[in-house]
Image (spheres, helix red, strand yellow):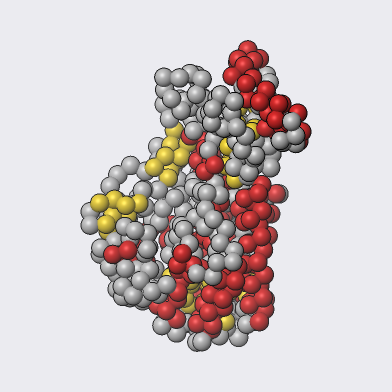
Amino acid sequence: MKNYIKYMALSAVLLTACEAELDNPIEDGGVYSSGSADFSTFVSVGNSLTSGYADGALYISGQQNSFPSILAGQFALAGGGEFTQPLVDDNSGGLLAGGTQIQPNRFVLALDAAGNPSPVRLEGTATTDITNVLSGPFNNMGVPGAKSFHLVAPGYGNIAGVATGASNPYFVRFASSTEATIIGDAAAQNPTFFSLWIGNNDILSFATSGGTGVDQSGNLDPSTYGGNDITDPNVFASIYNQEIQALMASATGGVVFNVPDVTSIPFFTTVPFNAIPLDATTAAGVNQAYVQYNGGLAQYAALGVITAEERDARTIDFQEGQNAVVIEDETLTTLPNPAGGTLPNIRQATADDLLLLTTSSKLGTLADPDNPGSVIGVGVALGDADVLIPEEQALIATAQASYNATIQGLAQANDLAFVDSRAILNQLADTGIAFDAGTLTSTFATGGAFSLDGVHPTPRGYAYLANQAIDAINSTYGSTIPKVNIGSYGTVNISN
């Protein structure tokens, strides 16, 4: 059966990637003030969003366009010093460990044989080997994949723990020792000014796994957490405060960012819930395959085992036109199957469900190449790891609200500049953000703000975030740091 999924209009992406730049760059000839801040030693701490990660990888040009690097360039106009980064060795983005590739190359936009643009992994062999440890210190302490508690975890840069997930290959490259902590290496530089953006991964890994992790609220021991779990808000608050105090020990000030909504990024908003177009004949044929399942639901509802509302929500019904995808939902009532076993816990998706970007390569394909009725999303449900259902979204929202209250409260208590990245990304998703050469939006591939992994910004997106940080810093410390021209920063990369 053919692939039914045609959900993105990317025909304009080549123009987007090659659009004209602005003609009016900011002049650097003025005299700028640092106000009450001291930018001479700027250290930036965080995760992938701090490192410049984009397109599903860490590569040189992404690092060079990280928001801390952009900030440092502007700080240099008002007394800022040298800003060093643990640059990788190439623009492919992959990582090696002793010659074996352990992280894939970055995404680029390529045209297939039919002329359709889509993200593909860049071909070629990576050259960045984590066994080649760099000599620091480094001002950019962004470590892709790090959660709040990883910043204070000894051994997070020990290569011996990479294979088991106990340590991080990106930190292995530039940790000062095998037992060093990220926050310790940052504080050891005696920063006069800092940025801290952490907490995204404390919920994002749960979200991008389709909610397959565990909400660890009430568990105060992060050493027992799984990789896709939600961090307990009290753990986050305690550790975040430790990190702020460690950085404030030498700093005149800093800027902190809160945690955005997962629903505002393309990874969760690109694939529609009703991604299945069917003609009337095919729809009727598919419905025949669900007659027994629907009949079983009706019987259990008549017996009062499930409510009429659950029966209706679970009933599978395809029509001519666009149809909702069939998904698994673990919150549904488990029902015995008269033929043996249990009825599947499946239903059709609604607008409240978020299909992951990665499902785009699955929908409409065959789960069993020898079975034409095994079309994923039609005859075979998308799995739990492919969809973020409302109950899972609620867990994320609760944790995020607590994290953000902590971040904003500590920013106020320590007179720190505060960037509401949650509001910024919501604006990108809702209306877009105009600038003098166009509009930034969160539309996948063509919106200009997000890279091809659907999570991390493009250089232009990072430049906009840097400008928002500059606004907050100028307002808090009375500085006059100029903003950058975001139109001079690129968007997505094209391979062919």
Measuring from the top left, give residue 406's x and y in whole percent: 64, 72
Q: Residue at x 62, y 59 (%)?
A: 260
Residue 264 relative to residue 231: left or right? right
The front one of 319 and 100 is: 319
Q: Residue at x 54, y 35 (%)?
A: 382
Q: Residue 319 in the image: state x and y as whole percent.
A: 68, 21
Residue 438 in the image: above or below residue 279: below
Q: Nearer the viewer, residue 259 or 166?
A: 166
Q: Is residue 103 above or below residue 315?
A: below
Tell me the quarter of the picture where residue 179 sits: bottom left
Between 190 and 374, the residue placed more toward the observer is 374
Q: Visible in this render: residue 291? A: yes
Q: Is residue 280 left or right of residue 451?
A: right
Q: Residue at x 48, y 77 (%)?
A: 42
* Residue displayed at 59% across by 42% down: 330
Q: Residue 283 at x, y = what percent? A: 63, 18
Number of marks in the rendered image:
0
- Say which quadrant the C terminus sits in: top left
Task: Please determine whether, in this image, residue 393 is positioned above or below residue 399.
Answer: above
Side (left or right) of 128 relative to 70? left
Picture coordinates of residue 458 (x, y %)?
A: 51, 53
Compare residues 74 and 274 and report the one nearer the observer. 274
